Image (tube, grey):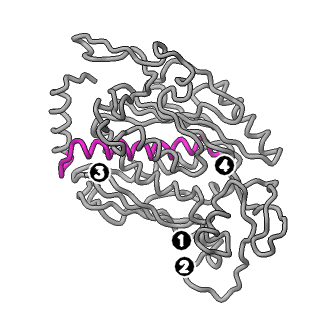
Amino acid sequence: MPLRFTTAGESHGPGLIAVLEGLPAGLEVAPADLDHELARRQLGHGRGGRMKIETDAAEVTSGLRHGRTLGSPVAMRIANRDYRNWEERMNPWPVAAAIEEVHLPRPGHADLAGVQKYGFTDVRDVLERASARETAARVAVGALAKVLLRAFGVEVRSHVVQIGSVHAPEGPGAGVEAFGTVDVSPVRCLDVAASAAMVAEIDAARKANESLGGVYEVRAFGLVPGLGSYASWDARLDGRLAQAVMSIQAMKGVGVGEGFDLAGRVGSQAHDEIFFTEERGFHRETNHAGGLEGGMTTGDPLVVRGAMKPLPTLTKPLRSVDLATKEPAQALRERTDSCTVPAAGVVAEAMVALVLASAYREKLGGDHLADAQAALRGYEERIGWRR
């Protein structure tokens, strides 16, 4: 069965909930597998005051027993420590105090379209769920997907390639070993000089009351050829990956492999020639396609890039309109970050991992992990794939 997940919860509510279905029984999971990923989501130069309040940890409430999956849905809860400061405003039940409504929608946020769609008068009814705080729940279920992928010999990593006007230099495709210290960089960039320039760019934007976006890259190593399918539009893996990445808050673009750059090349410079040797089997010397052809994995590293816009909550707000009076006003100003591209890369890792883990489950089946691993070995032998 494919993996399916859902999340629930508001940014300043009591907490976030995540439920993941489809994991096989027998997968060993440790608390650190979850909490390490949640801590990585909180990294990055340019984060605001919220990260000083929250220390995210996942409380598993079902689906695991003594550190092993049961094959049933895994449910987790991540408490919002900041809820204590918002208990009256965000209490699920009516409160005695009068709560002031928010009537100042922010350009670039879900605020205005959300109140129009659902008939609200208070923007907070929209912004609390639309907030990127929800991604903590995604990272929690993505951490479980990563544990499953690791059992199939797959590793998923990310790094930042652009913040604002600063681009990391293009080099040869980084192997999995290159990512061992990426989180040491304050912006999760593999290039030391570019990392320093990105930090300076964020500092300058913060002083100017601005926010910054950028581009991150997710890579997956060890994928078997043939995940996904060309046979149906919704089975194409590149389409599923694009939807998963674009579902992350503030994303405005996604590319697979060399993406938009390929559009400006001639065909001979855009495609990956195919070779065969007894030692390596079928292989390619280049990876312009980013590990995907015809909606299926090729066995080369998967490469997916996401483009994130600058955050819409600004310390010097843009012009807006008061929903109640219809008069011109400044948009809502709340606590915010200057740049979250490094964290967005971690969230994208989780989403890519969930898509890939689901593709493995669809292909291999198996009620127990050992069944799926045996099916994988049989498939690799049939196609003669060499890792």
Q: Which residues are magenta?
A: 340-369
Residue on which disc 1 sits: 14
Q: CA distance from mark 3 to mark 4?
A: 35 Å
- SS for dot 1: loop
Q: Are marks 3 and 4 in contact (CB under 8 Å)?
A: no
Give the foreground label among 2 and 3. Answer: 3
Residue 163: x %, y % from top left: 67, 35
Q: CA distance from mark 2 to mark 4?
A: 28 Å
Residue 82 appears in view: no
Residue on which disc 4 sits: 47
Residue 154: x %, y % from top left: 34, 35
Q: Amino acid at mark 2?
A: Pro
Q: Residue furthest bottom?
A: 96
Q: What residue sits 76% from the left and 53% below the top? A: 314
- How packed mark 4 is, by other alpha carbons closer than 10 Å (few <14, some 14-19, many 20 or more), is some
Q: Amino acid at mark 3?
A: Pro
Where 107 falls versus 349 (above or below)? below
Task: Give residue 264's quadrant in the image.
Answer: top right
- How packed mark 2 is, by other alpha carbons closer than 10 Å (few <14, some 14-19, many 20 or more), is few
Residue 201: x %, y % from top left: 74, 35
Front-lying residue, 252 or 23: 252
Q: Amino acid at mark 4?
A: Arg
Q: Are marks 1 and 2 in contact (CB under 8 Å)?
A: yes
Q: CA distance from mark 2 to mark 3?
A: 33 Å
On the picture, is 275 further left or further right than 183? Answer: left
